[in-house]
Image (cartoon, rainbow, N blue to C red):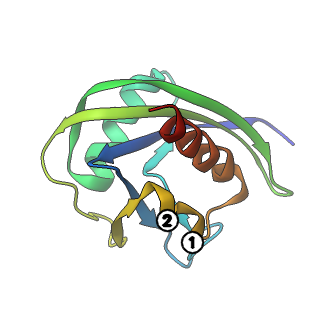
Amino acid sequence: MSHIIRVAVAVIQRRGRILIAKRPQHLHKGGYWEFPGGKQEQDESIDKALIRECFEELGIVPYKFSPFIQIEHSYPEKSVCLDVWQVTDYLGIPKGLEGQPLLWCPIEDLDDYQFPEANLAIVEAIKGQMIKL
């Protein structure tokens, strides 16, 4: 395994629902649902990566966000570090700019969708936070 791929991930919540996106079929774990985000570029801070990825994928600009959880996961073909942020406010209206279907999923229904293994800890953290509220 050469290096760990660092990924900025957005958990965008609105009225008890979380924004999820379906991965294109041709990508790793294609057809699975995920939280929006993408790879951090060289010499880019992780918060800048979050803002850039949200803009490129969804056409929104997060301006209120905070660290939520960090997850390291190894797949047979690669290792990832998911730097997950809770996005509480943003400019714009989310759209699937890369052709990906989007869904505002009720928190209690997240288990009904298939996520890549690395994302399961995010689902559990979201549900755990809901119980505390």
Q: Is residue 113 visible?
A: no
Mark 2 surroundings within 10 Å by alpha-carbon count, few (fewer than 14), some (14 through 19), many (20 or more): few
Question: Eyeballing the image, is 5 above or below 33?
Answer: above
The quarter of the image holding the C terminus is top left
The quarter of the image holding the N terminus is top right
* Residue found at x 60% / y 44%: 122
Q: How many marks?
A: 2
* Residue found at x 40% / y 60%: 106
* Residue found at x 57% / y 71%: 112
Give 72 or 48, whichever is nearer the viewer: 72
User: Which kind of residue does numbered mark 2 sit on?
Assistant: Asp
Q: Is residue 55 visible?
A: yes
Q: Which residue is mark 1?
A: 112
Q: Helix, strand, or loop for circle 1?
A: helix
Quadrant location of residue 64? top left
User: Which kind of residue does numbered mark 1 sit on?
Assistant: Asp
Mark 1 touches mark 2? (CB < 8 Å): yes
* Residue found at x 41% / y 33%: 86
Question: Eyeballing the image, is 66 above or below 52?
Answer: above
Give 52 or 65, whichever is nearer the viewer: 65
Side of 107 relative to 73 (left or right)? left
Disc on res. 109: 2
Q: Helix, strand, or loop for circle 2?
A: helix
Question: Eyeballing the image, is 24 above or below 17?
Answer: below
